Every structure is written in structure tokens, then in C-alpha cells.
Amino acid sequence: MTVLRTGRVPARPAPAGPRHRLRTRLDALDPGVRRDVVRLLSLLALLPLLLLLARAAVRLPHSFDLLTLYGLTVLAGTVCLLHLAYSRYDDPAVRPLRSRPRDADAFPALPARPRVSFLLAVRNERAHIEDCVRSMAAVDYPDLQIVVVDDASDDGTPEVLERLSGELPFTLVRLTENLGKKGALVRACALADGDVLLFTDSDCVVAPDAVRTCVDALVRHPELGAVSGHCRALNTDAGLLARVQDIWYEGQFRVSKAAEASFGSVSCVSGPLAAFRREAIYNYLPAWAEDRFLGAPFRFATDRQLTGYVLGQAWRGRALKERHADSPFVRDHDYPELRWRVGYTRSARVWTRVPSRPAAFLRQQIRWKKSFIRNLFFTGAFMWRRGPGAAALYYGHALWVIAAPVLVVRHLVWAPLHLAGLLTLLYLGGVVLKGCVWGVAYRFDHPGDPAWRFRPLMSLLSCCVLAWLLPYALLTLRRNVWSRSAA
């Protein structure tokens, strides 16, 4: 897969025959009937897993052990995620959401064609920044302001941006002092005059219709304070590690974010394509830029933390604004704290360069683990208020991440040392089974694409390698360096 200097992006696959015809027939049904039919089809597709789950649940009281309970829990969680993603998720840019708040009319409506500020912070991305900026300038949205902030790059990135600024319609801000990604984006927000603030990352290429799609979702649903786009890997030709991550990204967005979106509580509007209503985040930008954790400035948690301000401002917003009352982001316009919903639009496409080398991949994952830890203390303090479904998904995922290192030590270290190799094999077999289930979901969405076979490899990588990173991330929380290099 290659990206041309003209900002072209990989073409979308052609619609599959039988699956496309099924979708067309479903779309022609009455919305209520369509919803019931989709739920029934989802349950039928998950029937083998449901039978396996029922069999394990019946046997659990007679042969209770930690591995059986863990496997049962993981299987049940996987079934719930898949059912929610395929039976309850609606793309807000395509059709009206079936689950909307009763007071949806109380949220301020956006103009039919709101102004959009498309914002980017970059540091040391000379090799790829031109592709990113050209794709931003090539989007098909008419009322667009583009602001690019160079965060004191020293690798030749400023020279590339200066050349592009004479050719493309964007505002370039050059910082002489490195502020970090959050600080640089807040500088961009100070210049932004859009009703919608939309962010991307410097290693990304956005589809021409991505901005319009995100805006359509927000305009159609005033209760949405933010939406995440759908991200895939851009550099899948870089090797096996990149291809594995590509399939993993597909599942994390298509399944995990879709499941969260069914409750209007997507916990992370991901940086590759993140659209926010101005009213939902503007007052909290100084709190974001000056975020502290464990007594020190915290430069990570950029995506998760900003999403947390949208999700939790009804309970935490007033205190955050009072803490930064002297900031022009708060002083000049005080927006009301609302119980915004956060969604995900699968039809808004973006591609990102994923790490192709193990060392860069591990550094990225450590940053993400640190963001998870910090955000757990913020969003975790109020997510229970957003309803049982949203709370179950959030805290269930958090528990799985926290328990993973313990379970890995027990099954991959303790068991072999105590000559319990069968326990290790059963554990790894369960991990592969879960990966295969996710792979089947990928194949359903992409019939004929053999890449689904990479998904079990990601499951093995997660349990054998990534699970060990959480303790390390906890011990190194104060090492604050941001870099987007995918080398």
C-alpha cells in the first residue's frame, strides 16, 4: 500500500455480493423491523459461542478453577461485545441512532454546515508530514480552517511545512520550545474559530470525505459531543507486525468502539480522526494541557483524557473550570456542562502509520498503558454514572487489562515451573480461540480477505508480550516523551 504525494488514500474494497445484497434488503425494512431482524441474525451467528458458553457455565460449579472462570468470563465478554457491535450499533453519519436521550432537544443544534477547524500538532515527522498535510487540504468540506503547529521539530520538518504553506491553504504555527502534543494542540485551538474542532495525527492520511462524514454525524445528533472515525494501518506493506496491527485496529474500532457507541459512551475518541463540538471541550483545554498525575505533569493520555472531559463534565466540569478560571478558554465563554454522548462513525476513514519494528511498537504500547492508568483514575471515577451498559464495558475492560499480567505470570511462568504444562497449553489454546473469533468477525466484514488469519497472532502477542508492559508502564509513569515515529 502506498500513499501518493497528492494525498490519495487506499481505495475502499468493492461491495461483496451476497453480503451487500443482504445489507440492501435490511436497509429497505422498517427501522423497527430491521432492528429486530439484525438482532436475530446476530444471535444466530453467535449461537456456537453461546452453546459453548452455556456448556462451560453448567460445568463450572462441578469443576471450579481459576482458568475455567477466566475463560468463561473472557468468552462471555467477547460474545457481548460482538452482539452489541453487530446488533445495536448504528453509524450516526448514515442513519438516526436508535438509542437517544429523552432530552435530545435540549442540546444546542449545530448549523446545517458548521465551520470546522482541522488541527494538527507535529514533531519530527519530516518523512511523512507532507502526506498528512496534503490529505488534510484535500478533504471535500467547504468551510474549513486548517492549523498546523510544529512543536519545535529539529529534523527538517519545519522546512517541509514552510514549503507546503506557500502552496496549500493552512496556517502554520512554529514553536521554539517543545510543549508536547497537548500543549501544541491547545495553541492550535487558540486560533481555531470552528464550531467543530477536528484533530488528526501527523503520521495519518485522512479520506477526502472523512471530515464531512464526522460533521454529518454531529449535525444529525446534537447530543453527540464528539465522534471517533475508523482507523486502519497505512503501511501494511512494512512487514508482518504492521499487518497484524492493521487487523487489530479494525477490531478495536469496528467491534470495541461500536459496542461502546451503542451506549453513547465511547471511552477514547482516537487521535487519528477525532471530532469534537466546540462547546464540549473548549473550557477544558487548559485542564488538558496542564494535566498532572501523581504530583507531576502528565504529557500522555491525550485522546482518552480529552474524551473523559466530554463524558464527565456533568460531574467534574464545574470544578475543572473553576481551577482554570483565569484562562481565556474559560473566562471568555462559559459553556454549560452537559451530559454529552460520544459516538463512533465507521464511515469516516483514516489511515495511520503503525510501528513496523518491535522496539517502536513496544514504546507505543507503553505510552498507551500509561494513558490507560492515568485515565482510569479520571474517567473511572464517574463512568458508573453513565448507565449499567457503559459502566460494564468500561470497568470490564479495565479489569481485564489489570488482571492480564497476573494471569500471564500464573499460566506462562508458575505453571511450567510446577510441571503444569497442560495448564499453559489450555491457556494459550483459549487465547488462540479468542483470536479466531475476532478473525471470523473480520472475515464477515471483509469476505474474501485472507488477512483475518493474522488476528490470532495479535491475541498471542497481547498475552505473551503486551501484558507484561502494564507493570513497567506503572513504574515509569514519569518518563514523559512524545514521539510519533513508526520506525
Image: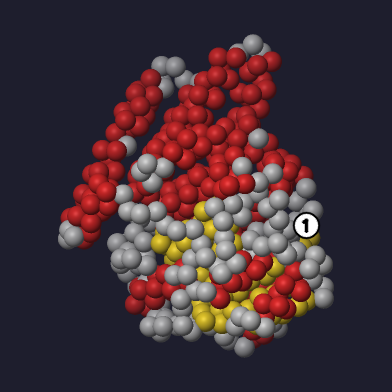
Q: Is residue 204 left or right of residue 250?
A: right
The image shows a total of numbered marks equal to 1
On screen, residue 408 versus residue 151, left or right, reads left
Q: In the image, 349: left or right of 330?
A: left
Whether 127 is drawn above or below 170: the answer is above
Residue furthest bottom as drawn: 332
User: x%, y% of residue 47?
Assistant: 29, 34
Q: Amino acid at mark 1?
A: Asn
196 and 393: which one is in front?
196
Judged from this view, the residue extending furthest toward the top is 419
Residue at the (67%, 66%) spot, across then down: 129
Residue 400's place in the image compared with 204, above or below, is above
Residue in the image at 18% along x and 60% along y:
28
Image coordinates of residue 97 in percent, x first then y, are: 32, 64
Q: Residue at x 37, y 67 (%)?
A: 93
Q: Is residue 48 visible?
A: yes
